Structure formats: C-alpha cells, structure tokens
C-alpha cells in the first residue's frame, strides 16, 4: 500500500519512474507551426478593380497594384497595406519588421482640429487669396463644432454616413452649397495624401443640384437711379464718423469704382492709393511678369480724390479692422442704396457684371475680358458670364440681316422669279 505522502528525499526516486520527454525531443507539430507563424509574413499584390490580373488573386505580382502584408509579426496578426507599389521596397520593410520582431506602432490618430490646422497652414503657404482662406476657416469651425456635438474626435471617424449628416446641417443652398462641398473635398483630399485616413469619403458625396440663374448687368437707367440714391442714402445715413456731404462722396466714389474697374467688393474696399497712377489702376501682375492696368474715366479719378481721407494707405479702409468686417459694412451700405433706388435684387457683384458685359458688347474678345477680370482661365469667364450670350446673339442676328440685301443684289432676277411662282400657286 502506497503511503499518503512522500518525503523530499523520496520524491526524486518516485519521479524517475514517470516517463518524461527528453529536453531535446522535437516539439509537437502545432507548436512548431505556431512558432514559425510568429515570424512569417507574406506580401502580395492587392489588385484594384480595373486590374487585368485581378482574377489571378495573389499569384500574380507583375502589375503595379498596391502591396499588402499578411501573417504574423511576433504574437500580432497583421494584414495591412505597406503603402508602396515597389516590390523590393516592400521586401525591405518586411525584413526590417521580422528582424525587430515587431512592426512599428501605428501613428497616433490625427484629430479634426489638428488636421484643419495643418490644412490651413498649407493653404497660407500656397499663397491662396485671403477670402478663400477665410471660407476654409468658416468650414473648419463648422466641422469642429459638428464633431464635438457628435462626440467625434479623430478625423478617421468621419465616414460617409457622418459626412452626409454634416452636409445636411449646412444652411447653404444652390451655388453656395456646391462651393462648400468643393472646399470639403479639397480638405479630405489633403488628409488622404497625408495618410491620416485610408480613404476619402468626400468624393462619394453627390453634388447638389444647382440652378444657375444668369446675373444680369445694371441697365443705364438703373445706374442713374443708383447714383441718385447714393446721394439720398448718404445724406440721411451715417457712414462711420462721416455723415452728410462727406458720406455722399464716399458712397458715390465707391459705386463708380466698382462700376468702372470690375473689382470685387473686397478688393475695392482694400484698394491702396499707390495702385492708381494718373488715370490707370494697377490690377495685378500676369504670369509673364507684365503688369495689368485698367484705365479709369476722369470723373472716377476725381471722385476718388474727393473721398475723405481715412488712411494714408487706403481709400475706403482704415487698415485697423479685418477686411471681412469692412467689406460687411460696405455691403450693408450698398444694400441701403439699392433699396433707395428701387432695385431689390441689386448686389455689389452686378457692378462687375456690368463692367464685363459692356466690354463684350463693344466687341472686346473674351480672352481680354478674362484678363481684366483677373480670372485664372478663360473658361471661368465663359462659365460665369453666360448672360452676355444673349447680347452677342442679337449682334449675330443683325450681322446676318445686313447680308440679305447684298445676297439679293448678287443673284439678279431671283426675287422676281420667286414672286411669280408665289402668284401662280
């Protein structure tokens, strides 16, 4: 009968009777496979939809599709893109991971605020116009506020569904909504290029339906009414510290500048005195290095010189406030002028349209009009100035009618023959 317990001296003698696998005995197959799998990675081409060898799956690797890795590094299972299409570079990445026994940790996710900060810094580095950067800032504030309300912190959390909800919260409509969507797509494209997100959901957002109504220029009668309303509105309303005749001179000069220069309202508000030399207004420097000027009528130059001096540098801006605030003040002043003139649909950009259509009606080529307006391409001019087509069509019809008399004269007897045939019928 075996004892209930053993002493320490007896335990080794009893243990020797138990069969124990020697230390050098091969490990079980499963365990060997697991150890080998700890350091086994397979790289392959993940064929895109348009690849002609997609049906061959991982067997084919001579195409230029992205390279992925699948397997184990250490005790971690891995299946991810290597962010390269170069096979040798991919092999080097895998050798480095296997040598270190682990892959580099994933970078910390980028927050929405950080992504916008980097994007705006890049926009300034590209020398984008200040109004464009201002619109990007508005979109960034709206997106950060929306993310905070939804409990979202990181940019990668914005999927297509959440992005659609964000767009649904916009108050913008028509062309404003389309432009904001373009800004959003540019931001997510930048984030994807920086590899903060695996895929940009913004291109999958359908563009809103835009009903583009042509913006018609002011008629001569409307311009006369606007100038008369400038005097009435200027006398009864205050413009900053100016009132009465001084305020009238300010508003009248501003209206004439918009009408005869084609400047946008923001550019007109921030117009520097040094840009006017004699009767010429410096617009910008072309890509060829040639300066582009627009001549101003004498009465416009005289009106500008009669404006009360608010700054040594600018005509209509002190330079102490933000240009957006100053532009907003002038927008409200013009709104009062249009109301006084009985033009409820009037706005500052119609002065620019009037400047452009007068040039086109005078026979100035579209290319030159595009240069005076400062458009980056003639296509922009053609796109935004479709109202002029009607006036040009009227000119074409008149040109055709002028040829009728000459055509009859060159074909003698034709008219008489036609009249006889009509009489017979």
Image (cartoon, rainbow, N blue to C red):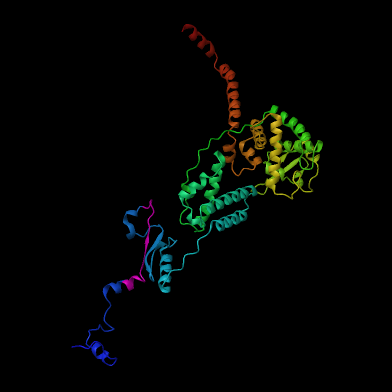
User: In the figure, 87 relative to 318: above or below?
Assistant: below
Q: How many marks?
A: 0
Image location of residue 282, percent across then percent down: 72, 44
Res. 292 in view: no
Residue 125 visible in this rendered orientation of the protein: yes
Q: Report whether 91 appears left or right of 319.
A: left
Q: Is residue 45 magenta?
A: yes
- What span is colored magenta in the figure? 34-51
Residue 159 vs residue 295: left or right? left
Q: Is residue 330 magenta?
A: no
Of residues 41 and 383, the one nearer the viewer is 41
**Residue 141 screen position, x and y as percent:** 59, 51
Please tell me in which quadrant of the rendered image residue 234 appears.
top right
Q: 307 or 139, which is in the foreground?
A: 139
Residue 264 location in percent, x, y?
Answer: 67, 41
Vertical comparison of 173 with 414: above or below: below
Q: Nearest the camera: 68 or 343?
A: 343
Q: How far from the left and from the top, in percent, is residue 398?
A: 60, 23
* Quarter residue 355 falls in: top right
> Is 383 located above or below residue 32 in the figure?
above
Furthest-left residue in this view: 1
Q: Quadrant of the N terminus?
A: bottom left
Q: Residue at x 58, y 40 (%)?
A: 380
Q: Nearer the viewer, residue 326 or 185?
A: 326
Q: Residue furthest bottom?
A: 9
């Amino acid at each position: 009968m075996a004892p209930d317990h053993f002493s320490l001296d007896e335990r080794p003698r009893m243990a020797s009777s138990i069969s124990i696998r020697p230390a050098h005995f091969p490990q079980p197959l499963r365990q060997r496979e697991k150890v080998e799998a700890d350091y086994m990675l397979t790289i392959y081409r993940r064929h895109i939809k348009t690849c002609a060898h997609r049906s061959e799956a991982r067997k084919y690797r001579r195409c230029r599709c992205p390279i992925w890795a699948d397997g184990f590094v250490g005790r971690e299972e891995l299946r991810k893109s290597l962010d390269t299409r170069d096979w040798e570079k991919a092999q080097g990445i895998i050798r480095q991971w296997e040598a270190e026994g682990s892959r580099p940790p994933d970078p910390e996710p980028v927050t929405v605020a950080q992504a916008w900060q980097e994007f705006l810094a890049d926009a300034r580095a590209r020398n984008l116009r200040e109004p464009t950067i201002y619109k990007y800032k508005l979109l960034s504030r709206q997106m950060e506020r929306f993310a905070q309300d939804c409990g979202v912190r990181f940019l990668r959390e914005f999927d297509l569904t959440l992005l659609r909800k964000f767009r649904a919260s916009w108050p913008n409509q028509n062309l404003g909504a389309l432009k904001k969507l373009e800004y959003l797509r540019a931001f997510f494209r930048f984030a994807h290029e920086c590899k903060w997100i695996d895929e940009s959901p913004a291109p999958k957002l359908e563009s809103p339906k835009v009903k583009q109504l042509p913006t018609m220029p002011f008629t001569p009668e409307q311009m006369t009414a606007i100038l008369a309303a400038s005097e009435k509105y200027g006398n009864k309303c205050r413009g900053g510290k100016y009132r009465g005749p001084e305020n009238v001179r300010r508003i009248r000069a501003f209206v004439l500048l918009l009408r005869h220069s084609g400047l946008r309202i923001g550019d007109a508000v921030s117009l520097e005195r040094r840009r006017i030399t004699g009767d010429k207004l410096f617009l910008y420097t072309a890509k060829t290095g040639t300066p582009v000027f627009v001549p101003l009528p004498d009465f416009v130059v005289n009106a500008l010189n009669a404006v009360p001096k608010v700054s040594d540098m600018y005509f209509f801006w002190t330079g102490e406030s933000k240009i957006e605030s100053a532009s907003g003040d002038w927008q409200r002043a013009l709104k009062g002028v249009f109301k006084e003139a009985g033009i409820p649909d009037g706005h500052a950009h119609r002065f620019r349209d009037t400047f452009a259509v007068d040039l086109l009606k005078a026979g100035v080529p579209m290319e030159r009009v595009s240069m005076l307006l400062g458009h980056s391409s003639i296509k922009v001019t053609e796109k935004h100035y479709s109202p002029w087509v009607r006036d040009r069509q009227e000119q074409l019809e008149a040109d055709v009618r002028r040829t009728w008399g000459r055509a009859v004269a060159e074909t003698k007897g034709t008219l008489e023959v036609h009249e006889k045939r009509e009489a017979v019928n």
